[in-house]
Structures are given as C-alpha cells and as structure tokens.
C-alpha cells in the first residue's frame, strides 16, 4: 500500500503538526479536569455494557486530549492506545461524503447528476430518477438499510438489484437510512474519479486530511494495531467484506486520526483549498427530519441541542424506519450547530460529535457495539461540560 506520508502537502503537514500540541501545553488543572469529566462518563458505560476497550479523544480550542481504557484484545491483553485501530462502522459514511464533495469541487461530478451518467445500465430505471444528492442523503425513495440477502455480492448482483428496484416514494419526500444508497454514491464517485473507491479514499482523502493511520484495507504493517471486536456472545470478530462495505462502513482508524479529522471539520482553514471546500460542502444541510438536518454524511442540529433531541435523532425510528423529509434551501448558516454520526459493525461501536462554534469535539471508539443511546448520553455529558459556557 502507498505510503501516504509521501503525498502530504505542506499545508496538510502544517495542519498535522498543529494537531499534535502536547498535553503539557495545558495547565495541569485543566488536563485533570477534562480527565475527570471523561472518566465519569466512560468508566460506568464500559462496566454496564461489558465493553473490553475504548479510545476516547476530545478537542478543546484546538488541543487534543486522549483517554484510553481497557484492552484491544481480550486474548492478548494488549492495552488500548490512541494508535489502536478500530472499525468505524457508519462513521465511514462521512469519508464517503467527503470524497464525493471533493469530486464535486474538482469538477468530476455534480450532486445534481443522476446515476446513469456514470452507470448507463441504469438509464430509464426508477433509481435514475434520484440524484446523487438524494443518494447521499438517503432520500432516493425507499432504498433499504441493507441489500436483501438474495443479492449476490458482485457487481452484476448490485447492477441487477438497482435495475429492478421499485421505490416507495418520489425522490426527496422521505429519508430512509440506507447502506445501498450511500454505497451507490461512493461507487459512482469512484467511477467519476476513474479510480477504485477504496484507492481514492486511501490515496486522496486520508493524506489530504493528514490522516496517516486510517485505512479501508488494513495493511500487514498495521495489523498489530488492529483491535479485535467482540459480538453479543463476546466472540472476537471483524467486519465482513460485503457488497458496498467499503463505501458504507469500511473505514478503520485510530482516535488520534479521528480527532484530527474532527479538528479539520471544526476549522478546515489550514487545509489545501479543494479539500477545505469539500469539508465545507459536507456541512451543508439539505433535508430536515424532526430536529435533525441531514447533510452529506454528517447529521446536524441547531446548537444548543437538548439531549432528548439528540437521542431522538439517533433513535431506532430514525435508523430503521422511513421518515418524512422536508427539503430545505442548502443550509450554510453560520449559526452554531452540532454535527454527529454514529457507527457500528458486528464487534465495534463508534460515535463522533463536534460543535465548530464552540471549538469542541469528541471521538468515542469501542471494540463492542453497545447501545447507541449510551453513546449519545456519554458524549453529551462530556461536551456539555467542555463547552466554554460551562467553564
């Protein structure tokens, strides 16, 4: 695999090093206060849900703090660190969105395009009535959460599925969270870039963001850092390479890289222009579903947001059911907003949230898929105390 460090621009390097300001730069009392806040939320969560290991990172005013708990492997007893690689699950969708946004700002595609522009075999099919924006916001008209089991895990199987798919609604009327939806967007983005999707993310997006320990295909040289996940029977597991796994839930990363990604989203000004514009594009809201506004990858809320609103926006009803969507004018308001995304695989659970206006953010990576409400409540408790108004 390509050594991405060779592809870092001067701006990306400057951004990378700016994120590595040591903990000692903060007063000891501040660091201990943050540790106390994080410990109080994370330790009881791990005990209640029998989570083997967690890597938590927070950023406050541009400074990262790392808090590591438990083990990356029950068998080897390897302790978790900020270099432990976790599966991100659907947090990966934010990288798919960033790649698509990058393709748009570099003129390779438009969100107003329709699938058949890149996949002629879909011309005249129902899926071709949806735009790439609809695919990226789960509003194509009723694509399911997963491909049906009978769909072969091949390009031919995928093409046949989309050719015969029948919608439940017109594009833009309802939001139904869907791996095939954003998976097709990622697949089309790869075609537009004349690249394999995974290769495009690993050689273009990760390096431009200064992420050196993030992968879709974990190389042999990094396998020692790859945590084992644990399923509901506490058996060690890792993600399966199913259809559109790379595009929908395939990124593996560390808390050090992910907090750097959060910092890039909080303040992308240090990035090169195309990737900066791409990050900005993923912050644009397009469809309102209750208190939540769906953008590309990220889900957002007017800030301050109540814990109840955040729980509702990450509820089973939002994940597993179709919900009425109200298209809004592209929302680029400078008003404070909280952005978040949750993700799970069979053995891992992740949650990321940040508030650019307050310069605060959190990454929570675990090697068990524990309940989403527990993630939201813990992150909310931490961010609420880290907000400047709380200090």
Image (tube, rainbow, N blue to C red):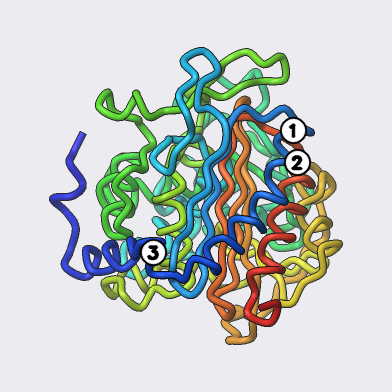
Mark 3 in CB contact with mark 2 (< 8 angstroms) = no
Q: How far separated are the C-alphas under marks 1 and 2?
A: 5 Å
Residue at the front extreme of this rendering: 28
Q: Quadrant of the N terminus?
A: top left
User: Which mark identifies residue 194?
Assistant: none
* In this picture, residue 327 sits left or right of residue 57: right
Q: Is residue 385 above or below residue 76?
A: below
Q: Earlier in the sequence, mark 3 or mark 2?
A: 3
Q: Which residue is mark 3?
A: 24
Q: Residues within 10 Å of mark 1 (few under 14, many from 20)?
A: few
Q: Nearer the viewer, mark 3 or mark 2?
A: 3
Q: For residue 340, which quarter of the picture?
A: bottom right
The one of 59 and 274 positioned closer to us in this rendering: 59
* In this picture, residue 216 sits left or right of residue 77: left
Indicate the position of residue 241 as horizontal and vertical percent values.
Answer: 47, 24
Q: Which residue is mark 1?
A: 47
The one of 300 and 350 positioned closer to us in this rendering: 350
Q: Residue at x 59, y 36 (%)?
A: 366
Q: Which residue is mark 2?
A: 44
Q: Secondary structure at mark 3?
A: helix
Q: Is residue 113 above or below residue 215?
A: below
Q: Secondary structure at mark 1?
A: helix
Q: For residue 358, which quarter of the picture?
A: bottom right
Mark 1 in CB contact with mark 2 (< 8 angstroms) = yes
């Amino acid at each position: 695999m390509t050594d991405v460090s060779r592809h870092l621009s001067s701006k990306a390097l400057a951004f990378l090093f700016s994120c590595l300001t040591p903990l000692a730069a903060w007063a000891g009392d501040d660091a201990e206060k943050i540790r106390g806040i994080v410990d109080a939320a994370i330790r009881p969560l791990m005990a209640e849900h029998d989570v083997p290991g967690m890597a938590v990172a927070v950023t406050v005013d541009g400074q990262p703090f790392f808090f590591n708990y438990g083990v990356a492997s029950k068998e080897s007893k390897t302790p978790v660190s900020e270099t432990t690689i976790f599966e991100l699950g659907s947090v990966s969708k934010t990288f798919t969105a960033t790649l698509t946004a990058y393709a748009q700002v570099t003129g390779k595609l438009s969100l107003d395009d329709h699938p058949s522009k890149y996949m002629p075999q879909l011309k005249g099919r129902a899926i071709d009535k949806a735009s790439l924006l609809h695919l990226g916001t789960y509003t194509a008209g009723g694509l399911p959460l997963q491909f049906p089991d009978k769909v072969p895990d091949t390009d031919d199987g995928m093409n046949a599925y989309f050719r015969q798919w029948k919608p439940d609604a017109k594009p833009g009327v309802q939001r139904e969270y869907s791996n095939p939806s954003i998976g097709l967007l990622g697949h089309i983005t790869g075609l537009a870039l004349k690249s394999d999707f995974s290769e495009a993310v690993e050689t273009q997006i990760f390096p431009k963001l200064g992420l050196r320990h993030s992968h879709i295909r974990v190389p042999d040289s990094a396998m020692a850092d790859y945590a084992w996940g644990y399923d509901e029977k506490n058996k060690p597991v890792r993600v399966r390479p199913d259809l559109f796994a790379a595009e929908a839930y395939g990124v593996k990363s560390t808390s050090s890289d992910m907090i750097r990604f959060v910092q890039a989203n909080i303040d992308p000004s240090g990035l090169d222009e195309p990737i900066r514009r791409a990050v900005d594009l993923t912050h644009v809201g397009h469809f309102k579903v209750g208190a939540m506004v769906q953008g590309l990858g990220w889900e957002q809320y007017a800030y301050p947001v109540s814990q109840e609103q955040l729980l509702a926006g990450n509820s089973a009803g939002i994940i597993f059911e179709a919900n009425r969507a109200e298209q809004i004018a592209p929302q680029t308001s400078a008003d404070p907003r909280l952005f978040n995304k949750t993700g799970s695989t069979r053995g891992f659970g992740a949650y990321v949230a940040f508030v650019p206006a307050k310069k605060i953010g959190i990454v929570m990576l675990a090697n068990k898929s524990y309940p989403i409400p527990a993630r939201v409540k813990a992150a909310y408790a931490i961010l609420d105390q880290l907000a400047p108004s709380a200090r």
